[in-house]
Amino acid sequence: MSEPQAVEPVADAAKPGFDEIVTLVVKHRIKAGQDVAYEAWLRRIVSVAGQWPGHLGVDVVRGKQGGLSLFTCVLRFCSTEAMQRWLDSPERRELVEEATPLLADGDQTEVAPHKEFWFAPLADAATPPPRWKQAVVTLLVILPHTLLVPLIWGPVLQLNTFLSNYVVATFLITLTIVLSVCYVCMPLATRLFAPWLEASKAHEHLEPGDGQ
C-alpha cells in the first residue's frame, strides 16, 4: 500500500477556483532495474489523466538523481478544483498504489500556479536550465511584445486625453505584456525550446487524449 498522499502547496491551492491554470508537479525516483516497468505504468496513468475533466496536458522530463532515474511529470489543470478531483480520484490512488514498489522515494507532489513554472517544469529544482538560456528565451518572448503591443494600443490610446496620459498608457501596455507573457507566450516558448533548454534531459509533451 502507498503512503498517504503528501501535497506541498507552493501557493494557496486549498481553495477551489476557476481563476487560473494550476500545475501539479509529480516527481518519481525509480528503483534500479525498474525503469521499463515504470515507463509502462507512466503511459497508463498519463492516458487516464488525459481523459480527466479540466486536464490541459502533461510534460514528462527524464533525468538522473543519485544514480537513479528521475521522472518529473508536470500536469496542468484549468483550476485548483479540477486538479484536486484528480488527486482524490480512486483511479489515481489505485495507480499510485500499483507503482509504489517501483519508487525509491514514494509519490512526491507539488502544486503551484501555472505562471510560477516558466522553466521549473523542465527539470528537477536542483538542476534548472542555465540562467543564460532562460535569459535568451525570456528576451525572445518579451522583445516582440515591447515592439508590437504599443503599436496595437496606439490608435486606442489616442481616442481621448485620459487614455493618452503617460501613466495610464504605460499601465495598459505593461499589463497586456505581462498577461500575454505569463499565460500564453512563455508556456508555449518553454515547450518549444525545451530540448534546447534541457539538452541533457529527455523531454516529452503530451496533450489530453494522446493515445498511449
Image (cartoon, rainbow, N blue to C red):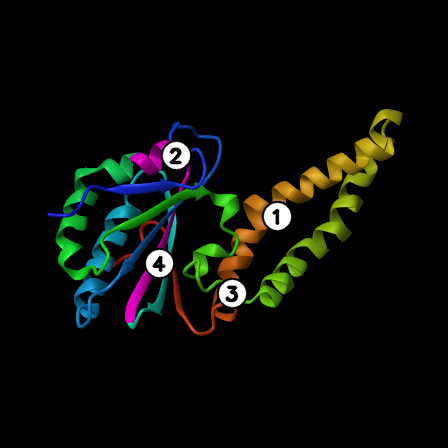
The answer to whether marks 1 and 4 mark residues whose Cβ atoms lie closer than 8 Å is: no
Up-down: is 51 above or below 159? below
Q: Which numbered disc, 3 or 4, marks the residue that appears first in the sequence?
A: 4
In this view, the residue in front, 107 or 48, is: 107
- In the rendered structure, does residue 22 fall within the stretch colored magenta? no
> What's the residue type where badge 4 is placed?
Thr
Q: Which numbered disc, 1 or 4, marks the residue that appears first in the sequence?
A: 4
Say which residue appears at 74% left-offset and 40% top-offset. 173
Say which residue appears at 51% left-offset and 62% top-offset. 192
The answer to whether marks 3 and 4 mark residues whose Cβ atoms lie closer than 8 Å is: no
Quadrant (top left/top right/bottom left/bottom right) for the C terminus: bottom left
From the top left corner, tell me how far across and down residue 167 is, in percent.
Answer: 82, 33
Magenta-highlighted residues: 68-84
The answer to whether marks 2 and 1 mark residues whose Cβ atoms lie closer than 8 Å is: no
Q: Which residue is mark 3?
A: 129
Q: Which residue is mark 1?
A: 181
Q: Which numbered disc, 1 or 3, marks the residue that appears first in the sequence?
A: 3
Q: Which residue is mark 4?
A: 72
From the top left corner, tell me how far across and down residue 3 is, in percent.
Answer: 17, 45
Q: CA distance from mark 3 to mark 4?
A: 14 Å
Q: Quadrant of residue 16?
A: top left
